[in-house]
Amino acid sequence: MLEKKGDFFGFNLDSRVIVPYTTVKGYASRRRGITIALKVANIADLDNLKSEIRGVLRKVRKLSPREPDNFAINQQDMLTDFYKKITGTSFMVILFIAAISLVVGGIGVMNIMLVSVTERTREIGIRKAVGATRGQIMAHFLTESVVICLIGGVIGLILGIISAQIPIRLMGLPQGINLLTALVGFSFAVLVGIVSGWYPAYKASRLNPIEALRYE
């Protein structure tokens, strides 16, 4: 028994029966063609799969290199083109939204770090008085900024995975987490943390220790 899926672009996904090949072979005519349907986990691997299928079928049918194919390999071009259009448009929209989010998020992190520097002015003065260098002060605040952005990156990744389950469940698409994409996202989080935290860290490192100790 298969789970009910309903209609998809006018096609009824429930009007199908799965039967073992060895069972149906005895009822089907010898002249009747056989169709083998395959599905790739990643649409980018489609061309490689077609080449691999062609090589396997030619070997099974014992065709010489000079003989043409006595079989056909077809793909659902309409659905493939539709998928490419959806993913291409979605990618541009998501890229635009992500760029705006990075700018807004970077400004927010910068403001948080500036407030932190102001509230910890006396602490910075004490650290400088006991021997902390400008580089150490700057590295400290840059690290805090990067950690804040990384925490936001982890939360964003989790929310992205959860929200992506909605179209995946509705359209029956293959799911998976691309490690490279996650690493790129975390790299941007680190970059935003460095860019946004540089000025507050620089400001903290340039504070006069005497004036900082007098700050209340």
Image: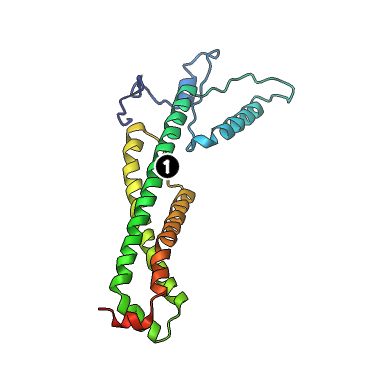
View extreme (bottom): residue: 130
Q: Position of residue 148 (x, y in %)?
A: 35, 62
Picture layout, residue 150 above or below residue 92 = below
165 sits left or right of 95 in the view: left
Q: Position of residue 55 (x, y in %)?
A: 64, 30
Could you tell me which quadrant the N terminus lies in?
top left
Q: Position of residue 82 (x, y in %)?
A: 44, 26
Asked where in the image residue 208 lies, by quadrant, the reply is: bottom left
Q: Position of residue 6 (x, y in %)?
A: 30, 25
View extreme (right): residue: 66
> What count of labels does the image hold?
1
Tell me the residue at 36%/37% (across/down): 168
Tell me the residue at 33%/41% (across/down): 165
160 sits left or right of 44 in the view: left
Could you tell me which quadrant the C terminus lies in?
bottom left
125 sits left or right of 72 in the view: left
Asked where in the image residue 193 lies, by quadrant, the reply is: bottom left
Q: Nearer the viewer, residue 114 or 139?
A: 114
Picture layout, residue 127 above or below residue 76 = below
Q: Secondary structure at mark 1?
A: helix
| Within-10-Å neighbours for mark 1: few <14, some 14–19, many 20+ | few
Tell me the residue at 54%/22% (across/down): 74
Q: Nearer the viewer, residue 206 or 39?
A: 206
Amino acid tagged 1: Leu
Please name the colour scheme applied to the rendered image: rainbow
Q: Which residue is disc 1 drawn over?
A: 95
